[in-house]
């Protein structure tokens, strides 16, 4: 007699086929999983390689970034220097324009000074000429003054001589008058013509000259007044 345990221990053909089918499916699944695992392993290895490559790229990029940062720092320093040079250039340009303005102003002042110097030189030459002319006129005036003094002294001497002659003539006239009173019948002696004729001052001829002071006229007036004494 068949028992339930004997029935369970002896699978049927359909069960065996189902089991085989399940095992095959499981095997295929395992194979698929193995293939997937292999693919995953390959992908993991490839990812590791890519990671290493990316890590190297990151390292290289970091190195390049540091170099670029250094270059940026240098460029920033150079840019600051350029800005400073630009400021200095603007200052130099301003100073140059100011210097040019001052130079133009100095040039104008120099030209004005030269013009004033030429005017002063001309005025100096004119003053020198006037001084020479004044000196010449002064010498001429001094010469005329000396000549006038000489003429005055000569006129004084002539006037003194004339006064002495007049005094002598007056004595002779007085003597003649006294003699005519003592001898009424006698004819009065006539004074000599040379004694009665007044002598004119011996004045040298004057050269053409400028009008001088009134003192030049005094000797003649003195002579005219003196010979009447």
Image (cartoon, helix red, strand yellow):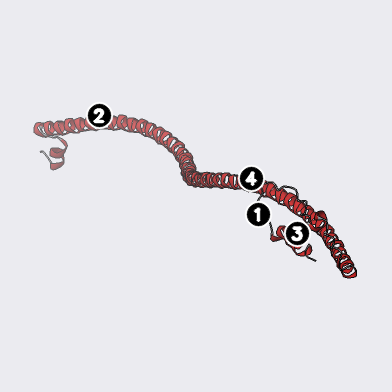
Q: Which residue occupies 29% across, 33% down?
A: 40
157 left or right, relative to 118 = right
Q: Residues within 10 Å of mark 1 (few under 14, many from 20)?
A: few
Residue located beneath label 2 in the image = 35
Q: Residues within 10 Å of mark 2 (few under 14, many from 20)?
A: few
Q: CA distance from mark 3 to mark 2?
A: 166 Å
Q: Which residue is mark 3?
A: 219
Q: Position of residue 9 (x, y in %)?
A: 17, 37
Q: What percent of the width, then of the height, locates residue 43?
A: 30, 31
* Residue pictured at 43% horizontal, 35% vertical: 64
Which disc number belongs to residue 52?
none
Which residue, given by chain and number where applicable, does mark 1 sit on?
211
Marked residue nearer the N-terminal end (1 or 3): 1
Q: Is residue 130 above or below residue 23?
A: below
Q: Assign a secondary structure to mark 3.
A: helix
Instruction: Judge depth for marks 2 and 1 and give the one in front.
Output: 1
Question: Distance from label 2 to label 1 (Cα)?
Answer: 153 Å
Q: Check if mark 2's residue and mark 4's residue have beta carbons within 8 Å.
A: no
Marks 1/3: CA distance? 16 Å
Q: Nearer the viewer, mark 3 or mark 4?
A: 3
- Describe the element under mark 4 as helix, strand or loop: helix
Label located before the other in sequence (1 or 4)? 4
Which residue occupies the foreground of this view, 35 or 203? 203
């Amino acid at each position: 007699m068949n028992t339930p345990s004997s029935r369970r221990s002896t699978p049927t053909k359909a069960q065996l086929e189902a089991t085989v089918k399940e095992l095959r499916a499981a095997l295929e699944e395992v194979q698929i999983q193995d293939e997937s695992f292999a693919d995953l392993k390959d992908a993991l290895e490839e990812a590791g390689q890519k990671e290493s490559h990316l890590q190297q790229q990151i390292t290289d990029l970091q190195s390049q970034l540091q170099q670029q940062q250094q270059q940026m720092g240098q460029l920033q320093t150079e840019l600051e220097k350029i800005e400073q040079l630009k400021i200095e250039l603007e200052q130099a340009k301003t100073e140059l324009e100011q210097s040019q303005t001052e130079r133009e102003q100095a040039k104008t002042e120099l030209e004005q000074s030269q013009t004033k110097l030429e005017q002063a030189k001309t005025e100096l030459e004119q003053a020198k000429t006037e001084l020479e002319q004044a000196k010449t006129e002064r010498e001429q005036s001094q010469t005329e003054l000396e000549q006038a003094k000489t003429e005055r002294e000569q006129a004084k001497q002539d006037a003194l001589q004339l006064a002495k002659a007049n005094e002598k003539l007056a004595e002779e006239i007085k003597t003649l008058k006294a003699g005519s009173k003592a001898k009424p019948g006698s004819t009065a002696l006539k004074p000599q013509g040379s004694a009665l004729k007044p002598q004119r001052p011996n004045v040298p001829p004057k050269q053409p000259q400028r009008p001088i002071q009134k003192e030049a006229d005094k000797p003649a007036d003195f002579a005219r007044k003196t010979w009447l004494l």
